[in-house]
């Protein structure tokens, strides 16, 4: 017997369904379009939180992920965002910059040794005229290689500099601060993070290396504020309400168990209350995972306009 062509079989099938009342086979739904990757079309860092972001237990201010909790324990080197990989000190540095700086999309921003990778750098490149650098490319991979003690850029090249956990690895602090001051534009800002593990600055007692095998030359304390001012910066030390509340309580000891690398008693004794400003209330600190409070300090350094 001859086989009917496929088009005829299809036509006969439609006629048969009409005659018998049989329903047509459901159409295959079109696939949902994939949402863009968070780094491809990120909203402005200064965009207000949405109601859903406000209602979430935790929120990443870099990629705007929300959830019930960050991954891992509360620590400046943990509490990871499962979407962008930020840890809590990354979010704190970004928070300090955004909270203290008028909206400045397109600003010339230099970030030294950013911990986060290509997705973060893509987002920063959409918000800013962004340069990421490193000196020791064995430890990080920046777009350019810059030595903070001799920055290969003209005067007044940048509107903002973000420098997280780098200055402690620089042998000559004074030269680095002079160079940073030189390449900042008038009115420009540096947001500087270093591990503050004790009250006053001193070199390590024994050779010390951080996780990327970079040697540590200085363990900074609260007297770094005066050093920054001596190099021409208007300087405040930004903290959370939790740290300021601890200092205001008069207690010399932290009320809970502390992480062993932090000498919180020495930190409490060395803190200079008049140099400190709060940049995060308890609700903000909880939302961003900025706990415990003694781990979160960032210097704001403004060059005179």
Image (cartoon, rainbow, N blue to C red):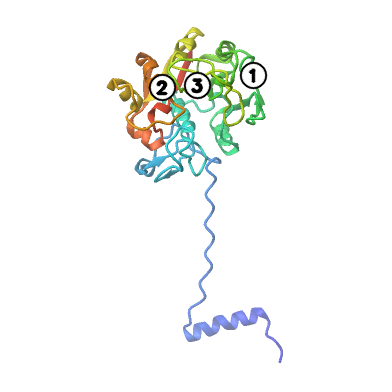
Q: From this view, report whether residue 116 is shown above or below residue 206.
A: below
Do the CB atoms of the residues marked 3 and 2 lie less than 8 Å apart?
no
Q: Nearer the viewer, residue 204 or 34?
A: 204
Please tell me whether mark 2 sits on a helix, a strand or a loop.
Answer: strand
Please tell me whether mark 3 sits on a helix, a strand or a loop.
Answer: strand
Spatial CA span between label 3 and label 1: 16 Å
Q: The N terminus lies in which quarter of the figure? A: bottom right
Residue that mark 3 sits on: 192
The earlier-in-sequence mark between 3 and 2 is 3
Q: Please report the residue visible at 63 percent of the width from the left and 16 percent of the height from the top.
A: 151
Residue that mark 1 sits on: 147
Q: Position of residue 157 (x, y in %)?
A: 59, 17
Q: From this view, report whether residue 124 is shown above or below residue 22.
A: above
Q: Position of residue 82 (x, y in %)?
A: 49, 44
The earlier-in-sequence mark between 3 and 1 is 1
Please tell me whether mark 1 sits on a helix, a strand or a loop.
Answer: loop
The earlier-in-sequence mark between 2 and 1 is 1
The residue carrying pointer 2 sits among few (fewer than 14), some (14 to 19) or many (20 or more) residues within 10 Å by Cα, namely many
The residue carrying pointer 3 sits among few (fewer than 14), some (14 to 19) or many (20 or more) residues within 10 Å by Cα, namely many
Spatial CA span between label 2 and label 1: 26 Å
Q: Position of residue 71 (x, y in %)?
A: 46, 43
Residue furthest out toward the right: 2
Q: Nearer the viewer, residue 183 or 8?
A: 183
- On the image, which quarter does residue 207 sit in? top right
Does any portion of residue 305 appear in the rendered image?
no
Q: Position of residue 137 (x, y in %)?
A: 66, 28
Spatial CA span between label 3 and label 2: 10 Å
Does any portion of residue 96 appear in the rendered image?
yes
Residue that mark 2 sits on: 238
């Amino acid at each position: 017997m001859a086989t009917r062509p496929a088009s005829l079989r299809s036509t006969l099938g439609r006629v048969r369904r009409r005659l018998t009342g049989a329903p047509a086979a459901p159409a295959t739904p079109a696939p949902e379009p994939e949402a863009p990757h968070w780094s491809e079309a990120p909203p402005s860092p200064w965009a207000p939180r949405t109601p859903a972001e406000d209602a979430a237990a935790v929120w990443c201010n870099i990629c705007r992920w929300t959830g019930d909790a960050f991954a891992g324990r509360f620590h400046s080197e943990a509490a990871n965002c499962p979407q962008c990989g930020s840890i809590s000190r990354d979010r704190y540095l970004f928070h300090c910059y955004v909270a203290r700086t008028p909206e400045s999309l397109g600003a010339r921003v230099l970030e030294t040794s950013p911990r986060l990778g290509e997705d973060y750098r893509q987002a920063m490149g959409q918000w800013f005229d962004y340069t990421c650098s490193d000196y020791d490319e064995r430890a990080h991979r920046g777009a350019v290689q810059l030595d903070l003690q001799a920055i290969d850029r003209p005067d007044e090249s940048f509107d903002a500099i973000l420098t997280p956990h780098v200055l402690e690895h620089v042998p000559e602090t004074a030269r680095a601060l002079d160079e940073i001051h030189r390449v900042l534009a008038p009115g420009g800002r540096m947001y500087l993070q270093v591990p503050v593990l004790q009250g006053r600055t001193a070199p390590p007692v024994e050779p010390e290396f951080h996780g990327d095998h970079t040697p540590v030359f200085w363990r900074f304390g609260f007297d770094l504020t005066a050093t920054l001012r001596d190099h021409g910066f208007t300087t405040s030390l930004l903290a959370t309400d939790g740290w300021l509340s601890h200092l205001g309580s008069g207690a010399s000891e932290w009320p809970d168990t502390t992480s062993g690398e932090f000498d919180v008693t020495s930190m409490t004794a060395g803190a200079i209350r008049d140099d400190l400003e709060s940049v995060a209330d308890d609700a903000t600190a909880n939302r961003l995972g900025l706990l415990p409070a003694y781990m979160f300090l960032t210097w704001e350094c403004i060059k005179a306009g």
